[in-house]
Amino acid sequence: MSALSFELKGKPDQRLDLSPLVPSWLKDLKPKEIEAIAIGTTRERLIVGDAFKLKGKDASTLQFVGTDARCDKIGVALGEGEIIVDGDAGAYLGAGMKGGTIEVKGSAGVLAGASMVRGTITVSGDVGERAGGILVGETLGMRGGVIAIGGNAGPMLGERMRRGLVVLSGDAGDYAGGRMVAGTILFKRGVGHGVGHGLRRGSLIFLEEPKDILPTFGDCGVLEFDYLRLLERSFRAAGKAIKLGDRARRLMGDMSVLGKGEMLILA
């Protein structure tokens, strides 16, 4: 049985709220019932059938085709199943998700994976500000799961992150890892100003040395870490070859707060 596919008919004249389109909500609905779901965000009523052409029947895997940055809340609160986005995604991609997987072949907007609990989000392109950060109404950012970003990330990546893993292949904006409570962010390339600002616990791992390190981080020298070997092994098992080794320069901080976090700059 083929995946349930939503092909955008044309550029929408308003932002779309696609939060109702998740496997757990659609699995028992008939095509006519799915087409009648409201997804508009203005006073002008807009339903799925107005904006999308439906194909396929297997609601355990949803595919969005031709979407753009006006298609918001894809996979919000996702608990199971798989979502594939053959295009771009708007704001709140996978925000608050509790399981399942989301793959975006383009870019995503602000707050991707905000306050997510479990699951995996993969974005081939860029993400907007506060990816893995705090969802509106929450007190903590990402609390579990994995976010893999192929492009660049906007400011405040992983803000108030509590648990989980973020892997960034491109450049990060300012204040990445800001106010983190725990968790791990791996930076393959450069970062902006204020990285680790207010870091309480957690690990920020750098393949390249940051150009701007806050003075509230204390240098502990170059050490060996079994943790890095285990992390590299887990990447290899997932089919991602990221060479980490086991030696890194460790900086503890942010000493202006709790100060039990760390920056690990690979040696």
Image (cartoon, rainbow, N blue to C red):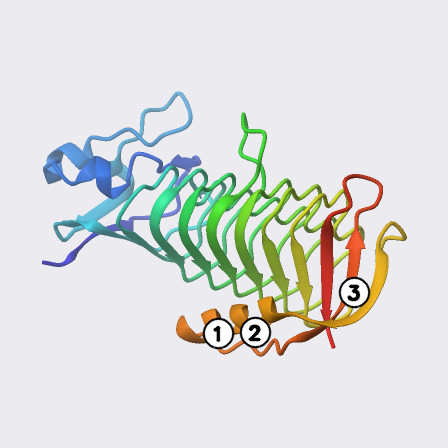
Please say if 85 is above or below 13.
below
Q: Residue at x 55, y 53 (%)?
A: 127
Report which quarter residue 189 is drawn in: bottom right
Amino acid carrying label 1: it is: Arg
Residue behind mark 1: 233
- Marks 2 and 3, the one that precedes in the sequence: 3
Q: Nearer the viewer, mark 1 or mark 3?
A: 1
Q: Is residue 21 left or right of residue 221?
A: left
User: Mark 1 and 2 residues: CB-CB less than 8 Å, in contact?
Assistant: yes
Asked if residue 147 shows in the view, the reply is: yes
State the CA–CA distance, disc 2 to disc 3.
22 Å
In front of the other: 30 or 53: 30
Q: Is residue 178 left or right of residue 120?
A: right
Amino acid carrying label 3: it is: Pro
Residue behind mark 3: 210
Farthest-out residue, top: 43
Q: Nearer the viewer, mark 2 or mark 3?
A: 2
Give the position of the C terminus as an image quadrant.
bottom right
Report which quarter residue 21 is drawn in: top left
Q: Secondary structure at mark 1?
A: helix
Residue behind mark 2: 229
State the CA–CA distance, disc 1 to disc 2.
6 Å
Give the position of the N terminus as an image quadrant.
bottom left
| Residue 30 locus on image (x, y percent) | 10, 37
